[in-house]
Image: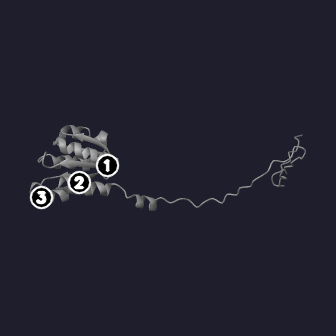
């Protein structure tokens, strides 16, 4: 799965990229929002994390563009913000943002752990087919002077076709 991260803070970008890579994502990181917007269709992300702090006027346009281009893909969008005052909660709901990450370390760790499937859940979901009934027969080699006869099946009457000669 691909994760697109759009942040201007290099430290947060590196930390987030590392955590998502460890969680199994292919991460694509941008500090320039316009470059991320330009390459959005080629990336086709499953997950987008964008900073409302770094791009206070443009994150809404970016989110609308993601929603318009990937409506059938169900791309999940998360917004990074330092406080609830900096985010317009009504627009977050309208734009269909999955969640807002206020506390970078703790909220982010909860989200990442929710993206990683639990090994017990995977084991329950994987079902094995019924075991095949396999018969094993141990055959000892026959002495060289003993001939083994293999019966040939007799053809059924419906299998036999008689061709009549043409006059």
Determine crowd level at label 3: few under 14, some 14-19, many 20+ residues with C-alpha closer than 10 A: few
Which comes sooner in the sequence, label 3 or label 1?
A: 1
Instruction: Look at mark 2 in the image and give the residue it sits on.
Output: 108
Residue 76, relative to residue 166: is it above or below?
below
**Disc marking residue 46:** 1
Residue 72 lies, in percent from the top left, at: 33, 52
Q: Nearer the viewer, mark 2 or mark 1?
A: 2
Of residues 12 and 98, the one drawn nearer to the viewer in this rendering: 12
SS for dot 3:
helix
For image coordinates 32% across by 47% down, the residue present is 22
* For residue 159, side relative to residue 97 (left or right): right
The answer to whether residue 32 is seen in the rendering is yes
Of residues 143 and 51, the one drawn nearer to the viewer in this rendering: 143
Determine crowd level at label 1: few under 14, some 14-19, many 20+ residues with C-alpha closer than 10 A: some
The answer to whether residue 95 is seen in the rendering is no
Q: Are marks 3 and 1 in contact (CB under 8 Å)?
A: no
Q: Are marks 3 and 2 in contact (CB under 8 Å)?
A: no
SS for dot 2:
helix
**Disc marking residue 84:** 3
């Amino acid at each position: 799965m691909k994760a697109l991260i759009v942040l201007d803070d290099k430290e947060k970008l590196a930390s987030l990229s590392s955590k998502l890579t460890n969680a199994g994502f292919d991460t694509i990181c941008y500090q320039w929002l316009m470059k991320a917007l330009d390459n959005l269709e080629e990336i086709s992300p499953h997950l987008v994390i964008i900073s409302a702090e770094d791009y206070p006027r443009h994150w809404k346009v970016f989110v609308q563009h993601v929603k318009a281009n990937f409506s059938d893909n169900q791309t999940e969008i998360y917004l990074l913000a330092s406080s609830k005052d900096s985010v317009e909660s009504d627009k977050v709901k309208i734009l269909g943002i999955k969640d807002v990450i206020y506390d970078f370390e703790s909220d982010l760790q909860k989200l990442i752990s929710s993206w990683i499937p639990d090994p017990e859940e995977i084991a329950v979901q994987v079902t094995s087919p019924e075991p095949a009934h396999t018969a094993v027969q141990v055959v000892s080699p026959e002495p060289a002077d003993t001939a083994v006869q293999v019966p040939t099946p007799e053809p059924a009457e419906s299998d036999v076709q008689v061709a009549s000669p043409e006059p």
